[in-house]
């Protein structure tokens, strides 16, 4: 309201200098005080209605997708396999194997599973997971929200059963989507500084609860994007499409959470975007098929490898981040259905994106 009052006073001041000729009234500066007061009230009412209209219109525009998403029914079934497994007695193992055959490879002896079920270190890990995730309702709600957006953009997607478990500390399988089932390995979401973790910092920085849905979203998105060819550009665009899907199905998450960067890494990437792009162009990397480029700029690592002094300052996977900006630029400039964009080849998408990062000051 203070803002509205200020704008009204500014407009009346401007009217006093310029006149209200369009309203067919005398110049405001020469109006009697009572007329000025009446004019002020009229203007105030008009401004309030105007700003309310703008606010409501903006809200309606912003929430159009959200309103549609809210109407999509999602009832996600959650099963806590780690609780079933670690709360059971060894004699119950055959029953558990019958109920969850997908988690028991045929070549694994029962003795190995009983050892895991009873070993003090595994029991301690289970205790740590339960202290953090005994109540999984918050993540269940987040998963349901995400799958409402998935159903909006990919209507034929089945709602999977969400299964939590304790795996073998494999960061490549933290969260896995596989149509009818989605699996979350909770031992890798205990917090980046947890004493159990010995992985390098660039991995453990994402062993946080805030990464559960982005990791699951990534696994889902990878099922919707065609694998890249061997060119560096194709690999960048592939990850750009994956991250763009995450934009859509995780609208309330930050860019840092979606790509698994810190805020400082996001800031560095944005501030150096033109330099990164210039390096790629000047070194003619876009259509290069050298397999080492993936290791340098696409795959997880402590930093990206320009072989320059800036390397240690850069985040890993900077090629993924650049691909993300290219896909965003394309979708901003082209009114095209999501499914059509996902089918586009990398070269065409890049050329039509007109991607050109702003030059750094």
Image (cartoon, rainbow, N blue to C red):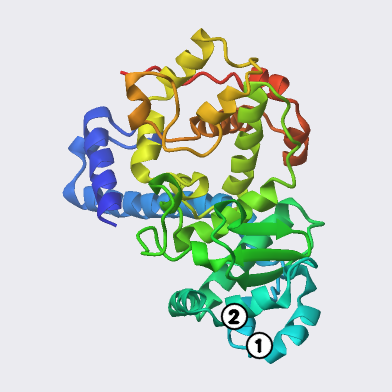
Image quadrant in which the N terminus is located: bottom left
Classify residue 190 by image quadrant. Answer: bottom left
Q: Residues within 10 Å of mark 2 (few under 14, many from 20)?
A: many
Q: In the picture, residue 226 is in which quadrant? A: top right
The vertical placement of 354 against 193, above or below, is above
Residue 114 vs residue 126: left or right? right
Residue 293 occupies which quadrant of the picture? top right
> Separation of disc 1 and disc 2 at Cα?
7 Å
Q: Is residue 358 visible?
A: no
Which residue is tagged 2? 117
Dot 1: element: helix
- Whichever of callouts 1 and 2 sits on the residue coming sooner in the sequence is 1
- Look at the numbered discs 1 and 2 and tell me whether their residues touch, using CB distance below 8 Å: yes
Q: Residue at x 76, y 52 (%)?
A: 154
Work out whether 286 lies above or below 302.
above
Please give the name of the residue rendered at 59% of the width and 72% of the height, measured from the top-left corner: 140
Residue 238 x %, y %? 66, 33
In the image, what residue occupies the spot 44% across and 51% down?
A: 199
Judge by depth and name the residue closer to the eye, 79 or 185.
185
Judged left or right of residue 24, residue 32 is: left
Task: State whether residue 204 appears in this view.
Answer: yes
Q: Residue at x 38, y 45 (%)?
A: 262
223 or 69, which is in the foreground?
A: 223
> Quadrant where the C terminus lies?
top left
Q: Please name the residue that numbered disc 1 is placed on.
A: 90
Q: Secondary structure at mark 2?
A: helix
Task: Estimate the x, y position of residue 93 in percent, counting from the top left.
Answer: 71, 84
Q: How many numbered discs sit on the rendered protein? A: 2
**Along the line of sight, the residue nearer the viewer: 54 or 48:** 54
């Amino acid at each position: 309201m203070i803002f509205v009052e200020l704008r009204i006073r500014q407009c009346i001041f401007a009217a006093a200098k310029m006149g209200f000729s369009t309203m067919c009234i005398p110049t405001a500066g020469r109006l009697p005080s009572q007329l000025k007061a009446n004019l002020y009230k009229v203007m105030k009412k008009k401004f309030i209605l105007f700003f309310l209209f703008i606010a409501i219109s903006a809200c309606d525009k912003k929430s159009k997708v959200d309103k549609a998403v809210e109407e999509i029914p999602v009832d996600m079934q959650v099963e806590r396999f780690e609780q079933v497994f670690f709360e059971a007695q060894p004699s119950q193992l055959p029953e558990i194997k019958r109920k969850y055959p997908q988690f028991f490879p045929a070549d694994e002896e029962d003795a190995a599973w009983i050892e895991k079920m009873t070993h003090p270190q595994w029991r301690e890990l289970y205790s740590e997971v339960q202290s953090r995730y005994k109540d999984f309702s918050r993540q269940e709600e987040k998963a349901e929200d995400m799958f409402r957006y998935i159903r909006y953009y990919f209507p034929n997607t089945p709602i999977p059963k969400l299964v939590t478990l304790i795996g073998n500390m494999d960061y490549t399988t933290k969260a896995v989507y596989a149509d009818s089932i989605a699996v979350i390995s909770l031992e890798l979401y205990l917090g980046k500084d947890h004493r159990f973790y010995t992985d390098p910092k660039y991995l453990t920085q994402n062993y946080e609860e805030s990464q559960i849905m982005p990791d699951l979203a990534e696994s889902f998105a990878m099922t919707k994007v065609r694998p890249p060819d061997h060119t560096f550009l194709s690999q960048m665009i592939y990850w750009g499409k994956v991250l763009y899907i995450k934009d859509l199905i995780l609208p309330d998450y930050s860019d840092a959470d979606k790509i698994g960067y810190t805020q400082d890494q996001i800031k560095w990437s944005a501030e150096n975007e033109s330099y990164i792009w210039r390096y790629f162009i000047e070194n003619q990397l876009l259509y290069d098929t050298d397999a080492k480029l993936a290791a340098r700029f696409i795959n997880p690592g402590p930093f990206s490898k320009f072989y320059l002094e800036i390397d240690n300052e850069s985040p890993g996977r900077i090629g993924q981040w650049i691909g993300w900006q290219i896909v965003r630029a394309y979708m901003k400039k082209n009114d095209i259905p999501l499914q059509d964009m996902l089918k586009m080849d990398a070269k065409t998408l890049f050329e039509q994106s007109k991607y050109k990062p702003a030059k750094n000051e």
